[in-house]
Image (tube, helix red, strand yellow):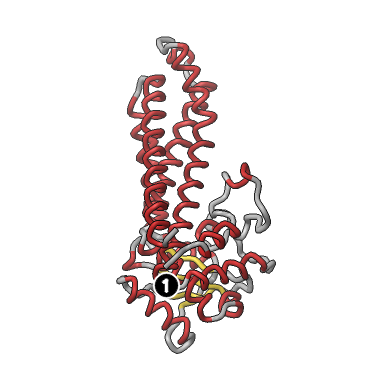
Amino acid sequence: MSIYTQKDSNIRKTWLLFTIFLSAVIGIGYIFSQVYGNPGILFFAVAFSVVTSIVSYWYSDKIVLSMYSAKPVTMNSAPELYRIVENLAITAGLPTPKIYLVPEKSPNAFATGRDPQHAVIAVTEGLLQTMDKSELEGVLAHEMSHIGNRDMLLGTAAVILVGFISILADMFQRSMFFGRRDSNRDTPPVMLIIAVALSILAPLAAMLLQFAISRKRESLADASGALLTRYPEGLASALEKLAKDTTPMRRANNTTAHLWIENPFENKKKTPFFAKLFMTHPPTGERIAALRGMKI
């Protein structure tokens, strides 16, 4: 499979998953609205989810950088790192993102920021100490691809939909236990049973779809990064080193784990199929195999 075919395939699969996701949200919202008999509750759930997610999206860079005590990098403090990022940005046709250094011995990197004009790439001290130039370039190209592919925007949209479903399900369950008993008197029993089942299963299904979209975006960033450097082996070799490294991340946080090129909490060994469904990243071995199977 060529790099271009891999990239196009990942884009199609991502948007197919997102379409399924959005359709499911609309369907669930319709069923709950029929049971409630009050569409105003739906508007509240949507508004709450959208507002909280947009605030997080708008200030994502400041929040994450503060959590990891990241410090800005200049041309004088890290000339090779700065030049690699600058050259990749020129090649990708993107503004040069701000560069930050995270005081962690565990090798890793992430990209954040609400758009390419406010993008940030952060790397750990361990990454700079572990990778050679081609490997570092492969990792940075992967992160640059997240910026170019607008993955923060897509990720925020997915979070909004998951949040909407979770809030709606929680409100429905509370109304069943603490609401007025006569409010559902006119609701067909079949519709009520479906709504109860959805209130339990829909949040889990939404979360699984969010993870699936995240895995596709990681695969897309791998393919796009390889296309950017024209050297897939650089990123493949870097991922091998990341998989073998056992240095724990001191400030690892579940809420931001999906941002890193390798999730600090996910098992680096062979993963059973069921466990893969709950992963934000494809298994590292599969990513390496895909990169080494690409043709330029």
Q: Is residue 197 above or below residue 230?
A: above
Q: Nearer the viewer, residue 16 or 27?
A: 16
Q: Which residue is mark 1?
A: 230
Q: The C terminus lies in which quarter of the figure? A: bottom left
Q: Find numbered disc 1 in the image and state the secondary structure of the residue it sits on.
A: loop
What residue appears at the point 40 percent right and 52 percent down from the top-left corner? Answer: 9
Inspect the image, locate mark 1, and give the three-letter code of the amino acid beneath it: Arg
Q: Nearer the viewer, residue 263 or 187?
A: 263
In this view of the protein, can residue 190 be seen by the observer? yes
Q: Is residue 38 above or below residue 250?
A: above
Q: Nearer the viewer, residue 237 or 149?
A: 237
In this view of the protein, can residue 52 be seen by the observer? no
- Mark 1 crowd level (few <14, some 14–19, many ≥20, 10 Å Cα): some
Q: How many marks?
A: 1
Percent across and percent down for residue 178 are 52, 22
Q: Is residue 85 above or below residue 262?
A: below
What residue appears at the point 48 percent right and 38 percent down from the top-left corner? Answer: 206
Percent across and percent down for residue 246 are 69, 67
Please give left or right for residue 232 compared with residue 113 in the image: right
Percent across and percent down for residue 18 are 39, 43
Please give left or right for residue 105 compared with residue 25 in the image: right
The quadrant where residue 69 appears: bottom right
Q: Nearer the viewer, residue 209 or 221?
A: 221
The quadrant where residue 84 appears: bottom left
